[in-house]
Every structure is written in structure tokens, then in C-alpha cells.
Image (cartoon, grey):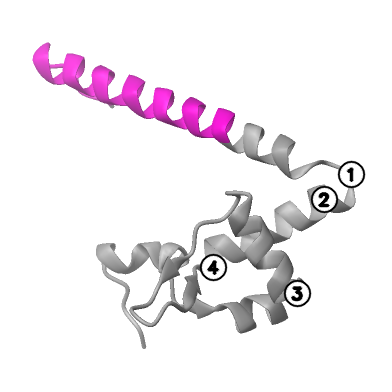
Amino acid sequence: MVILLAADSSYKDKKVITIGIVSELTGLSERQIRYYEERKLVFPDRTPGGSRKYSFADVELLVEIANKIEDGVQTYEIRQEMVKQQKINEAEEHKKMIQGQLNARFGIRKK
């Protein structure tokens, strides 16, 4: 039996998968995957030897990207949508932080 600790709960974000395995999982060629990295759509980590390492979240993202490309969406448009979504997420996180500070300041507790 495996017990996941809170720190381990983000296994989807751990960069442990090689480009060859990602290629097999997604059906994309290694060249396509590297191209999406060049277009700043995916951001693998690098080992000291320079090998790319991807996460399960990256694999899911690459499948989404491939589907959008197949539907005729350009990489530039995908990148613009990613930037827009990131800004929305950051704004939501900022709003939650401010609300938490206000709640703490005025002693408001969630039920």
C-alpha cells in the first residue's frame, strides 16, 4: 500500500518523464514536442546532461495542444490563450489571498 503525503499530492507536476516516453504517450514526434517547447507552449525541466523531463500535466497539455492544432488553431493563438488563462488564474489567487487577509483581520470564519 502506498500512502501519499501532502507534498506528494502533486505527482502530476513532477518532471520525471523523458521525451521518448512522452512521444509514445501522446503520439507526437519528438520533433513536434521540441517545436511546442520552442513556441513556449510547454516548459520541460533539464537534467544536468541536458535531457528534457516532462510531467504528467505536461503530457495532458501536449495532447490538448495537438488537438487544437488538428482543429486548425495556430500555436500563436494557443500561446495567447495560455497567457490569458494564466493572468485570470493569478487574479483569482490574488483575490483569494486578499479575502483571506480580510477574513483574518475581521475574524470572519467560513462555515
Identify the disc placed on residue 63: none
Callout 4 touching callout 3 (CB < 8 Å): no
In the rendered structure, the answer to whether residue 101 lies left or right of residue 13 reads: left
- Kind of residue indicated by mark 4: Phe
- Kind of residue indicated by mark 1: Gly
Q: SS at mark 3? A: loop
Q: Which residue in the structure is indicated by mark 3? A: 29
Callout 4 touching callout 2 (CB < 8 Å): no
Identify the disc placed on residue 72: 1
What whole-number distance in Å separates the C-alpha atoms at marks 4 and 2?
20 Å
Q: Earlier in the sequence, mark 1 or mark 4?
A: 4
Tell me the residue at 33%/79% (across/down): 48
Q: SS at mark 2? A: helix
- From the top left corner, tell me how far across and down residue 15 is, in percent: 43, 70
Tell me the residue at 60%/55% (across/down): 38
Magenta region, residue range: 83-110
